[in-house]
Image (cartoon, rainbow, N blue to C red):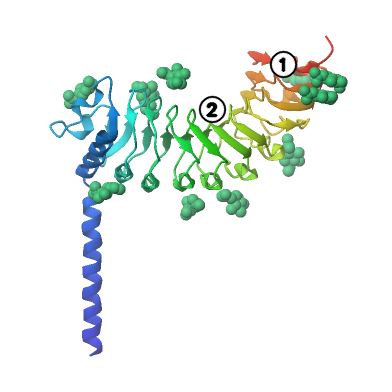
């Protein structure tokens, strides 16, 4: 009795595993990728340069324009449809491109909802949907890419605040959300992203920044916050923990108070924008020993002296 029940459960276990095996097998097939990309093609309503003519079953998927396959798995590893003039929407089927590492759709006219099925793409390192017509909130499932290095949603009409899930992307190096209508505070949790090199939040409506966190992210090479509603004074030691900073842009905000006296500590600085604020007092003399500096903008403030 015991023995037959044991054998029965073994059998059930085997049936269970083999059905998982079958599901797994269909997922490791290039025809899944082909099916997903043909679904995308059918959601593209305008292709003014006839780019998609060879996206057909008579041509191998890996030779389709914009598609690159990985050499190891022979599955779609990169989909780059940037600057192709497309209009359309993104179908959920793209979430089946399970070997995708890079997804670039910059400078097209995609709109509609970004399907949450994209969050299945666990291998993604690059997401770039810059300059399209997306609107609404940034979906919170963007926080679920364990390998993401570069996240670009600039130039659409995203609004609302940055979803907290984004600060779970511990491998992130580039965060570019510029030219949207995002608002609220930049959360303190941005400090969790210890590999960040570039933060670009220009041209939004952010009204608060955790200065003691952001000006302490020593991995940063670029911090650009131009054209927001940020206010208050800058810490005098703004550069103490930013040894690699090359581009600092705080222009067109409502910062006030004196310029930090120790800007010279940002020794790698190439570009400094502090114009269109309400800084007062004099320009620190030792700013002149930033020998790498190429561009300094201080106009339209309330600075005095020679
Ligand atoms: C598909 O079209 C592109 C651009 O027109 C071309 O470079 C590529 O060779 C074509 N692929 C095939 C297999 O014809
Ligand atoms: C995508 O294609 C564009 C235009 O061909 C190119 O400039 C860009 O570097 C490519 N991006 C990636 C991530 O390959
Ligand atoms: C891929 O995704 C779509 C929509 O999310 C789904 O309907 C389809 O069955 C999926 N699987 C395969 C193997 O194409
Ligand atoms: C991309 O789109 C933006 C906004 O429409 C435009 O300013 C920019 O010149 C475009 N870039 C290219 C390379 O077409
Ligand atoms: C945060 O990351 C962990 C580990 O990568 C993951 O298990 C979890 O689902 C993520 N949480 C959110 C809210 O995305
Ligand atoms: C940020 O890091 C802190 C401390 O490690 C952790 O408690 C918190 O959950 C993290 N927040 C997010 C949004 O990942
Ligand atoms: C960075 O953090 C340290 C330690 O918490 C603190 O003493 C310092 O003032 C911070 N720097 C800035 C610019 O806020
Ligand atoms: C600039 O700051 C001064 C105080 O230093 C204040 O009197 C003035 O109202 C501020 N101007 C603007 C435009 O915020
Ligand atoms: C730059 O100026 C500061 C303050 O006057 C000084 O301590 C520092 O040694 C100078 N650095 C160089 C490289 O001259
Ligand atoms: C410049 O600063 C002075 C003194 O703090 C203040 O009275 C004046 O309103 C400021 N000017 C502007 C344009 O903010």
Q: Residue at x 74, y 14 (%)?
A: 288
- At label 1, counting other C-alpha atoms closer than 10 Å, the crowd grade (few under 14, some 14-19, many 20 or more) is some
Image height check: is 33 above or below 178?
below
Q: Which mark is residue 152?
A: none
- Counting labels gives 2
Disc 1 + disc 2, Cβ < 8 Å:
no
Q: Earlier in the sequence, mark 1 or mark 2?
A: 2
Badge 2 is on which residue?
179
Is 273 displayed left or right of 66 in the figure?
right
Percent coordinates x, y for residue 223 in the rendering: 61, 29
Image quadrant in which the N terminus is located: bottom left
Q: Position of residue 69 (x, y in %)?
A: 27, 35
Q: CA distance from mark 1 to mark 2?
A: 22 Å
- Quarter holding residue 93: top left
Query: Does residue 114 appear anywhere in the picture?
Result: yes
Q: Is residue 303 left or right of residue 113?
A: right
Q: Nearer the viewer, residue 250 or 291?
A: 250
Q: For residue 125, which quarter of the picture?
A: top left
Q: Is mark 1 within 8 Å of ligand 10?
A: no
| Between 9 and 303, the one nearer to me in the picture | 303
Quadrant including the C terminus: top right
| Residue at far left of view | 58
The secondary element bearing badge 1 is classed as: loop
Label 2 CB less than 8 angstroms from ligand 4 = no
Q: Nearer the viewer, residue 291 or 176?
A: 176
Label disc, if present, on residue 298 of the rendered structure = 1
Q: Residue at 72% of width from left, 39% of height from top?
A: 212
Q: Position of residue 77 (x, y in %)?
A: 31, 37
Q: Which residue is depicted at the point 49% across and 41% down?
A: 138
Depth check, front residue: 62 or 119: 119
Disc 2 crowd, CA 10 A, few/some/many (<14, 14-19, 20+): many
């Amino acid at each position: 009795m015991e023995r037959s029940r044991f054998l029965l459960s073994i059998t059930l276990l085997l049936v269970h595993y083999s059905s998982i095996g079958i599901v797994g097998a269909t997922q490791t097939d290039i025809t899944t990728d082909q099916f997903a990309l043909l679904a995308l093609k059918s959601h593209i309503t305008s292709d003014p340069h006839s780019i998609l003519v060879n996206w057909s079953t008579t041509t191998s998927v890996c030779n389709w324009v914009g598609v690159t396959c990985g050499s190891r798995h022979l599955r779609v590893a990169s989909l780059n449809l940037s600057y192709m003039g497309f209009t359309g929407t993104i179908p959920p089927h793209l979430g089946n491109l399970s070997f995708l590492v890079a997804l670039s759709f910059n400078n097209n006219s995609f709109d509609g909802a970004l399907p949450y099925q994209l969050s299945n793409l666990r291998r993604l390192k690059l997401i770039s949907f810059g300059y399209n017509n997306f609107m609404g909130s940034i979906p919170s499932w963007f926080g679920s890419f364990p390998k993401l290095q570069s996240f670009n949603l600039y130039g659409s009409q995203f609004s609302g605040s940055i979803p907290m899930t984004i600060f779970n992307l511990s491998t992130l190096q580039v965060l570019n959300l510029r030219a949207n209508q995002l608002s609220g505070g930049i959360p303190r949790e941005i400090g969790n992203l210890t590999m960040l090199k570039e933060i670009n939040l220009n041209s939004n409506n952010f009204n608060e920044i955790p200065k003691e966190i952001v000006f302490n992210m020593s991995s940063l090479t670029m911090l650009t916050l131009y054209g927001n509603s940020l206010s208050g004074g800058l810490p005098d030691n703004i550069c103490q923990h930013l040894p690699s900073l090359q581009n600092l842009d705080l222009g067109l905000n409502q910062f006030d108070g004196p310029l930090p006296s120790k800007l010279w500590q940002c020794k790698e600085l190439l570009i400094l924008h502090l114009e269109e604020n309400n800084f007062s007092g004099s320009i620190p003399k030792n700013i002149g020993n930033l020998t790498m500096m190429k561009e300094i903008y201080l106009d339209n403030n309330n600075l005095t002296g020679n």
